[in-house]
């Protein structure tokens, strides 16, 4: 097995048979020199918690893109995102981010997510059909994040295109295939525009603070320390690129999974209180996040394999979440299964780098999927077996999701 196995149309359409082969091949599989992969749950969980592994991003960028690229604007922003940091810098920045996020009550976030979902559906409900990716899934997380940051929807114009332009580089920059030179150049241009926009927003909040996340990023301190402007800007960008496409893809993946399992969809329609359990099972069954990675920080041995400093281990969470050694009947979609909760899924990482926004992501997905099924109870996906999937082995999602419904009989929720 080599990296080419994970870059084929068959893999993009249905990666799970490939994951079975990956797990059967061993605890670790060597894809190319210094690049390893594991698809087993227990091994991936161990790697996520092992302090001998972390982020070796600058060295990776130098090796992948060249010495002259390591200080490019896009990589300088990536280096300061909390996901990319190692202790002690990671400890400091994560504590400050957690303090800022904890000031946002989950009840308020749930209400915000529901309000945005209803607003978006109002815009297309009378059409009788829509591409849910462009009209709903992609827009919802952007609008929610903008409201958290205190940005009006009209304010998104100056940076929306640049933010979207960074989403793909963020997911591909540290894949084994990497970005092309042209893609790096484009990402640099978008990064510079975004930095200018958000630095301007920081200046506005210093002059006139609001009850929003940008103001809290400026205000929070821990042991007398605060985040620098560069750190704040980098992690605002991280909010968008990490929380945008992953959430958008997950909304689509969940709807596909539900419609491919009509009995489970009917259960959910009859018992909307199952929405939390539904989101957990959708995350396990067909996650938008299929892989993460950790870099080896020191020579080490694990499960009888020797790794050298600078090696990279890819953790295939999509495979781990279907590992029969961990989950009963893992290829069966079953809402409310007893052998899983959200903390046991590897979608949100683990150890030091467990996702800060995991709970908020769950709330957002519950609102997005639950509201859609409530407002459009006869929603259908006509081309369920002819979907086009993004050509990515890191992020999984459909390129578009054309749906129909009988708008004349829609219920009144006024």
Image: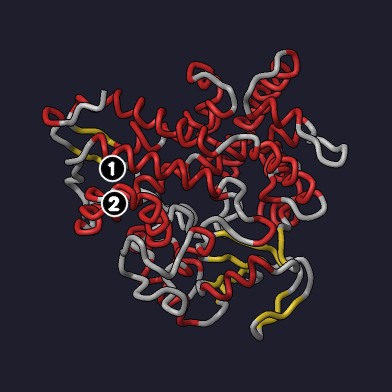
- Judge from the rendering whether residue 103 lies leftward or rightward of residue 332; answer left or right: right
- Judge from the rendering whether residue 231 lies leftward or rightward of residue 412; answer left or right: right
- Quadrant including the C terminus: top left
Instruction: Tell me the quarter of the picture where residue 365 sits.
Output: top left
Picture coordinates of residue 195 (x, y %)?
68, 28
Picture coordinates of residue 338 (x, y %)?
40, 68
Q: Residue at x 76, y 33 (%)?
A: 220
Q: Residue at x 42, y 42 (%)?
A: 248
Q: Residue at x 64, y 29 (%)?
A: 213
Q: Secondary structure at mark 1?
A: loop
* Mark 1 crowdedness (10 Å alpha carbons): few <14, some 14-19, many ≥20: many
Q: Earlier in the sequence, mark 1 or mark 2?
A: 2
* Mark 2 crowdedness (10 Å alpha carbons): few <14, some 14-19, many ≥20: many
Picture coordinates of residue 316 (x, y %)?
51, 65
Q: Secondary structure at mark 2?
A: helix
Callout in the foreground (1, 2): 2
Depth order, front residue of 198/18: 198
Q: Which residue is mark 1?
A: 401
Q: Residue at x 34, y 38 (%)?
A: 133
Which label was assigned to residue 280?
none
């Amino acid at each position: 097995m080599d990296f080419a196995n994970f870059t084929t149309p068959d893999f993009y359409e249905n990666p799970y048979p490939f994951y079975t082969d990956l797990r059967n091949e061993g605890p670790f599989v060597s894809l190319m020199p210094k690049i390893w992969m594991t698809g087993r749950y227990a091994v991936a969980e161990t790697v996520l918690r092992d302090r001998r592994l972390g982020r070796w991003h600058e060295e990776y960028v130098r090796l992948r893109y060249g010495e002259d690229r390591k200080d490019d604007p896009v990589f300088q922003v990536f280096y300061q995102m909390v996901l990319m940091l190692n202790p002690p810098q990671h400890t400091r920045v994560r504590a400050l981010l957690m303090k800022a996020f904890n000031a946002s009550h989950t009840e308020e976030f749930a209400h915000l997510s529901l309000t945005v979902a209803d607003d978006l559906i109002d815009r297309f409900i009378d059409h009788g059909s829509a591409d849910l990716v462009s009209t709903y899934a992609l827009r919802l997380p952007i609008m929610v994040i903008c409201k958290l940051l205190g940005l009006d929807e009209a304010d998104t114009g100056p940076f929306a295109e640049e933010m979207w332009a960074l989403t793909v580089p963020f997911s591909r920059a540290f894949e084994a295939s990497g970005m092309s030179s042209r893609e790096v150049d484009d990402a640099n241009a978008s990064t510079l525009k975004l930095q200018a926009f958000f630095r301007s927003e920081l200046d506005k909040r210093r002059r006139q603070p609001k009850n929003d996340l940008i103001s809290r990023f400026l205000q929070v301190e821990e042991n007398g320390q605060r985040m620098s402007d560069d750190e704040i800007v980098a992690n605002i960008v991280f909010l968008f690129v990490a929380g945008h496409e992953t959430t958008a893809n997950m909304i689509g993946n969940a709807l596909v999974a539900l419609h491919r399992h009509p009995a489970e969809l009917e259960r959910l329609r009859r018992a909307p209180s199952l929405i939390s359990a539904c989101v957990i099972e959708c995350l396990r069954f067909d996650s938008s996040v299929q892989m993460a990675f950790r870099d080896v920080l020191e020579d080490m041995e694990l499960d009888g394999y020797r790794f050298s400093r600078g090696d990279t281990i890819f953790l295939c969470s999509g495979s781990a979440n279907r590992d029969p050694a961990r989950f009963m009947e893992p290829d069966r979609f079953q809402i409310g299964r007893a052998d899983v909760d959200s903390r046991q899924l590897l979608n949100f990482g683990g150890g030091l780098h467990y996702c800060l926004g995991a709970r908020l992501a769950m709330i957002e997905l519950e609102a997005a999927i639950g509201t859609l099924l409530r407002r459009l109870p006869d929603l259908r996906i006509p081309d369920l077996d002819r979907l086009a999937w993004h050509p990515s082995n890191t992020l999984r999602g459909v390129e578009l999701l054309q749906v129909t419904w009988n708008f004349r009989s829609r219920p009144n929720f006024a």
